[in-house]
Image (cartoon, rainbow, N blue to C red):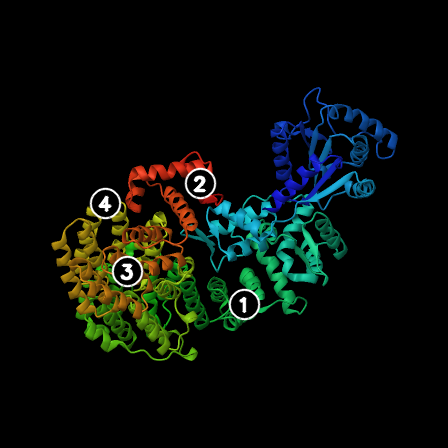
Amino acid sequence: MSVARSSIDQVIDLVNADGGPPLVVVTGRTGTGRSTVLAEIGRFLQARGRVVIDTRIARDGVPVDRRDGGTTPGPAGWSAPLTPVDGAFDDRSTARRAATAMAASVVPREAVVLVDDAQWMDRDTAAVLEALAHRVAGTAVRYVCAVALPCPEPLRSAGVAALRRLRAERLVATVRVPALDLDATALAVRAHVGALPSPELVAHVRARSRGIAAAVVDVVSSVRDSGGVRLVSGHAYLVPDAPDDLADGSAPPLRGVSLISPAAWRTACTAAALEPAGPVLPALLATTLETTVDEALARLRDLEAAGLLHRARDGSRRFLVPFLASRLRAELRPYERRRLAALVVRAAWQGEVALSRPALADLIAVAGRLLPAARAHADLVAAAQETRREATPCRDARWWRAAAELAGSEDDRVRAWLEHCKAGKRAGDAPATIASARKLLDSGSALPEVVRHELYMVLVLALHANGDTEELDAVANGTAFWEADEAVRAICRVLALILRGSWGAAYSLLLRARPIWAARPATRERGELIQWVGELVAGRMDEFEAGLVVSPVTDGEGMRRRYPTDWAIACMVALGDVQRGREIARTAGLAESDLLPTHRAVFALAEGRPEAQEMARRSLADRGRHHFELGDPNFYQQFGSLALAKGELGATRQLIATARAEMHALDHVLDVLDATIEATLGEVDTGRARLEGALDRARDNGVVVGTELLLSMLVRLHLLAGDVPGAKARVQDLDAVADVLRSPRAWIHATSGRALAHGDTAAAAECLRLARETGQAFDEASLGLQLAWAGLAEPEVLVDVYAFYGRLDAPLARAWTRSAMAARGVPVPGRAVTKAENERLLGQLLTEGLTNRQIASLLGSSEKSVEGRLGRLFSRTGYRSRIELAAALLDGSYRH
């Protein structure tokens, strides 16, 4: 239950209670949702026949009728249920007479009077309200007043005393609308982004908004619009480098700030920029505003009274809502922000302000050339070096960019731009990487040959990551090139061809140009690495194995030694060889946490670990890299297979679209997913045609890796179509590919194909043994289901398969397994669990927009059966249409 709902329920209980207090005060900070609480209470009471009078107090203390939105005084003849009466505060008899007159219009109607923004009432109105509480006590009339905290004068002094007296007589109750807790924040974030937020995203929003409901919406909008939120398969993740401050032009409208004058507004904006100064803030504020420290302190106290600032024990002042500080800083002009940042930096240099090295570097990066260049440059470089492991890449990039602009020598400038390029690459910021690489390559600086060559290759990868296909094609075709020597041109052309999916042309060019690139140490290493991977892709396993040499990696050797190791693991990922991939990692001395996120995820997916899907989603949400990853197609294929087993067809299709937009090399593996979806929806011929086309494309390109997946699926589709000779012909192709690749995955699929096409129980047993012994738990389950369904494996296999898919929470695969169990006479455990799971799966499939015929094909049942199940589900749940049920499932309100 959200905290707002809890507050609503409390107020309703007080209003409806016999002998309850006549006055209920709803308090909370600006933006917590007091007005929302009042509105919900009004709707609830009106729906139950209560008379509700809805008013609001304007800033000038005049009550207005909220029937027209609360913008004008009530219409002629309108009897205000609460209004100021001159002299009521000083003369209690005047207050009582006014209360009697006002009560006469509400008591006979047993009205509930809602008064929003009651903090603006004056002392006379407060006196009348106190008298009203006495006058209507014992009746059914209730006054519910919403008051924003901190309460301004004049109500603060008069209201506190009145509340104290009323509380002593039990005539008032106070209900506070608290800030949203983490759970309520998560619900608000989910409603705004339309996806389930990660704990990191919720914590970030909660910290920046302090749980103030209005600020939560602003924070989420800001982070999302700045690219700080990534959506993956219905989940929302916080990008690790999500900025804390707002970029120019990205600030949402400023809401929930009540400032009394332009001077207070200027004070707030300036104080937000000077906030890091801590206890020295008043002095710096006085300097900036050209006033005295006493006047600056008085202005800060006004902001504290307005509920914007909080004073800590050490004398420092912080904005209660950090996002508000960012929003106020965004109101300043760029030069003003730079000037104020420079002011804080100088104070820190003088020892007046205590700042961490990173915080100081952040301010220096803002101040730029307004500071002495030499010292500012030295501090930025020191921060980048000292926090190399801790600083996020984007923060690191900001520091190096500022250092480049402040550098006093060409060598320092080149070094800073190089580091900026590396940080941009780590952050996945392709535009920044491209810009810094071009700046260095076009600068005419005397870069070391190895650095220049590396920059060209980084540029090619960044162009690919940025989607600059036109320039990338020009590089691949050799029709456009930069000022690079012949060896670099050759390697870059090969790399561009690979990125565009032309493995055959790339490998041919690599061999032709070998005398050129092999003669230069700077290009030989990369060329040999590409050639080594090319041998694998083409199925020349002897040459590939000869080049597979992995040595231990130590921290001192850095990424240069790590790079071949990552490629070696990626090759095993591409082959689907989990065991050997882990062996390579162990040989290199890499722990699980040292592996690339996609490598960790694909191992977990293949091994069927319950956390695999979350690991896969996170690896997609944080992919700060620009290099070509050979294992990506298999990663997407594995991730998509799990999503499909869960019945998430839309998510699977989105994964395929994302993968095809990112890569072209080895993309034939993705056609397996497309064909699987088509076949499960009854389009067997369409799926078979797709696989045939993908197989022809791979063969024309000289690619063997991944074709075993295409052929294995083709065997199944031939059998579904009743084409046994076609299936047996594909088994021969599968055996040939397995003989070439000699990988566990190839042998597993070859033996499963032989078992299915020839009815070979020995081959079926061999398939499951291989999968079990090589750690391919996901393949063992999916192939075990097929083999047991065909009567080629013991029925007991289905019990293990059913439990496996249960651990993965894969309801569609569980439904398929139940069908197989029923056909083989295997009891299905847990009738109640099965019923709930079936309903959840049916609801999930409705969100996919499938027709009854498609659902029937997917579940292996008839349209009539699906219609009956849907009818019973609607009858039981009370939903009246597919749309209602799908919406309930999507927003989390569906309860099965």
Q: Label 1, on which residue? A: 373
* Inter-mark Cα distance, 3 to 4: 23 Å
Q: Which mark lies nearer to you, 1 or 4?
A: 4
* Inter-mark Cα distance, 1 to 4: 67 Å
Q: What amino acid does circle 4 point to? A: Glu
Q: Which mark lies nearer to you, 2 or 3?
A: 3
Residue 320 against residue 102 in the figure, above or below: below
* Inter-mark Cα distance, 4 to 2: 28 Å
Mark 2 in CB contact with mark 3 (< 8 angstroms): no
Q: Quadrant of residue 868?
A: top left
Q: Residue at x 39, y 69 (%)?
A: 595
Q: Which mark lies nearer to you, 3 or 1?
A: 3
Q: Earlier in the sequence, mark 3 or mark 1?
A: 1
Q: Which mark lies nearer to you, 3 or 4?
A: 3
Q: What amino acid does circle 1 point to? A: Ala
Q: Label 4, on which residue? A: 683
Q: Label 2, on which residue? A: 887
Q: Which mark is residue 784?
A: 3
Q: What amino acid does circle 3 point to? A: Gly
